[in-house]
Amino acid sequence: MTGEDKAPRLYFEDLDVGRRFTTGSVTMEPEAIKAFAASFDPQPFHLDDEAAKASFFGGLVASGWHTASVTMRLLVTSGLPIAGGVIGAGGDIVWPRAVRPGDTLSVVSEVVAAKPSASRPERGMVTVRSETRNQDGEVVQIMTARLVVPTRASTY
């Protein structure tokens, strides 16, 4: 995995609508795809090359949940340096294209909404749209997440 950095932590006041973030990248190795699937999504098209050839996908593919997990790792380590961590409060996720062995994934995120809490001045709600893309720039996952983000006045 590349792109990990020690960026300054961001607070609600730093996350203006339109602000964009780009992560490092990770390459999806077949062994990792199969290991994740064996533990969390044991379907033939994630586990077995031959069975995958006869499937809807025509070959081995990563679980969408594996893609989501890699996306989270990239956001936490190199994409969204939010003070107090990336704390989700709900969202939406779609997988428009399968992830295949050898694909190199990175994430581009944009703040699409930000609203201070009316009752909790130490936090706000920020909505971030994140596109996970492969090495060809093709979108393999779109995640829109509502995040709880501390203000500078918080004690986080």
Image (cartoon, rainbow, N blue to C red):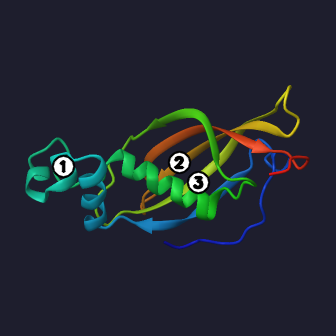
Residue at horizontal 29%, vertical 57%?
A: 100
Callout 3: helix, strand or loop? Answer: strand
Q: Which residue is mark 3?
A: 108
CB atoms of marks 2 and 1 within 8 Å: no
Q: Which residue is mark 1?
A: 45
Taking depth in this image into account, of 6 and 38 the one nearest to the observer is: 38
Taking depth in this image into account, of 156 and 129 the one nearest to the observer is: 156
Left or right position of 20 against 59: right
Q: Position of residue 77 (x, y in %)?
A: 60, 64
Callout 1: helix, strand or loop? Answer: helix
In this view, 96 is above or below 139: above
Q: Position of residue 129 (x, y in %)?
A: 60, 42
Q: Position of residue 46 (x, y in %)?
A: 22, 52
In this view, 138 is above or below 135: above
The numbered mark, 2 or 3, whose residue comes first in the sequence reads 3
CB atoms of marks 2 and 3 within 8 Å: yes
Q: Looking at this view, name the residue that lies furthest to the top.
A: 118
Residue at horizontal 14%, vertical 51%?
A: 52
Is disc 3 surrounded by few (<14), some (14 to 19) or many (20+) residues within 10 Å? some
Callout 2: helix, strand or loop? Answer: strand
| Quarter occupied by residue 76 | bottom right
Q: Which residue is mark 2?
A: 131
